[in-house]
Image: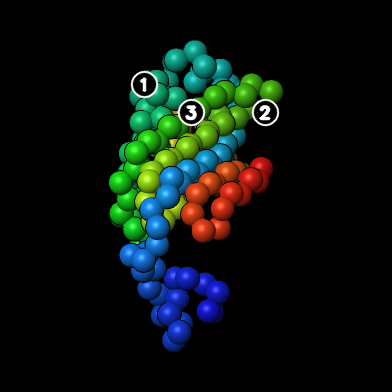
Amino acid sequence: MSDLTHFDDAGHARMVDVGGKQETERTATARGSVYCSPDTIALIRSGGVKKGDVLSVARLAGIMGAKRTPDLVPLCHPLALTSVAVDLAIDGARNAVDIEATCRLKGRTGVEMEALTAVSVAALTVYDMVKAVDRTMRIGDIRLVHKAGGKSGDFRGE
């Protein structure tokens, strides 16, 4: 387990000590989707959801989720995020609400978990807001698509 930073030599979970690391500019972007019925997509697009503007509420929820990541993921450090951007877009051809979140900071540890949490919370919020009309929704494809900064350097995925 020596390659896994969240375990000590005895295999016990631990929070990584980042005190000796250099502060660098760090950024991470994650994406995911909520797949809905065509009728649900039309309802979201028209603004006819009784609970309110689905995309605006989900955007705010994603930002809040990024800020609360260490409360949800036990070994994450509390971070002083300098920026969180969450964008949602409807893809009618795929019957999906696509979500992208980018988090930034200057610090000693990365912001991948914050970006992934932002996407996850935004997706759960979309689900919550329209579940009364579509129980067939699926949340999926949540993944890290970019990270920059830190010792491990840049990563690009899709």
Residue at the location (37% across, 36% down)? Answer: 83
Most extreme residue toward the right is: 93
Q: Secondary structure at mark 1?
A: loop
x, y (%) of residue 61? 36, 35
- Mark 3 in CB contact with mark 2 (< 8 angstroms): no
The Cα atoms of the two marked residues, 1 and 2, are separated by: 23 Å
Most extreme residue toward the front is: 22
Q: Residues within 10 Å of mark 1 (few under 14, many from 20)?
A: few
| Amino acid type of the residue tagged 1 in the rendering | Gly
Image quarter in which the N terminus is found: bottom right
The Cα atoms of the two marked residues, 1 and 3, are separated by: 17 Å
**Residue wearing tag 1:** 52
x, y (%) of residue 65? 36, 43
Left/right of residue 16 with respect to residue 148 in the rendered view: left
**Residue wearing tag 2:** 94
- Mark 1 in CB contact with mark 3 (< 8 angstroms): no
x, y (%) of residue 67? 32, 44
| Amino acid type of the residue tagged 3 in the rendering | Asp
Most extreme residue toward the top is: 46
| Amino acid type of the residue tagged 2 in the rendering | Arg
Of the two numbered discs 3 and 2 on the same chain, state the one appearing first in sequence: 3
**Residue wearing tag 3:** 87
Of the two numbered discs 1 and 3 on the same chain, state the one appearing first in sequence: 1
Q: Nearer the viewer, mark 1 or mark 3?
A: 3
Image quarter in which the C terminus is found: top right
Residue at the location (48% across, 37% down)? Answer: 101
Residue at the location (38% across, 44% down)? Answer: 105
Q: Secondary structure at mark 3?
A: strand
Q: Residues within 10 Å of mark 3 (few under 14, many from 20)?
A: some
Q: Secondary structure at mark 2?
A: loop
Of the two numbered discs 1 and 2 on the same chain, state the one appearing first in sequence: 1
